[in-house]
Image (cartoon, rainbow, N blue to C red):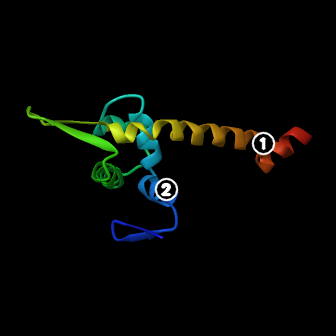
Amino acid sequence: MINFRDNRYRCASEITLDLISGKWKILILSYLSENTFRFNELQKLMPGATQKMLTAQLRDLEQDGLIVRKVYAVAPPKVEYYLSEFGSRLVPMLKMLCDFGADYMESFPTATKNDDQRA
């Protein structure tokens, strides 16, 4: 067993899954792997995410050291988010997850799609 941050894990991969689990975290990390974004820009990219949920997920990712929140001392306040050096190490895994999802969709099409092909 691995004891880490008051949790017990059976293997280190569970720690990684715990870090990226959350409805919007993988999507946030994927967007930030391509560019630096402000909060409103991220919110526009994810219209299904509420402001409260997006804020919570960004805070979690920042606390875990996967993203950086940079605040500029200007009026009005300007805040940008980008991947930390440690968060950048997740990019190849995120790409692999995306590739797997695309391959899976092709290998196991939906029943509706199969029904359309038979017609």
* Tag 2 residue: 17
Q: Is residue 55 above or below residue 1?
A: above
* Tag 1 residue: 107
Residue 83 lies in quadrant: top left
Dot 1 amino acid type: Ser
Residue 29 is labelled as: none
Q: Residues within 10 Å of mark 2 (few under 14, many from 20)?
A: few
Residue 78 lies in quadrant: top left
Instruction: State if disc 2 and disc 1 touch (CB < 8 Å).
Output: no
Position in image of residue 52 (x %, y %): 31, 55
Image quarter (top left, top right, bottom left or bottom right) of the C terminus: top right
Position in image of residue 42 (x %, y %): 36, 38
Q: Going 52% across and 67% down the picture, which residue do you hit?
A: 10
Of the pair 107 and 1, the residue shown nearer to us: 1
**Label 1 element class:** helix
Q: Going 32% across and 52% down the picture, which residue do you hit?
A: 64
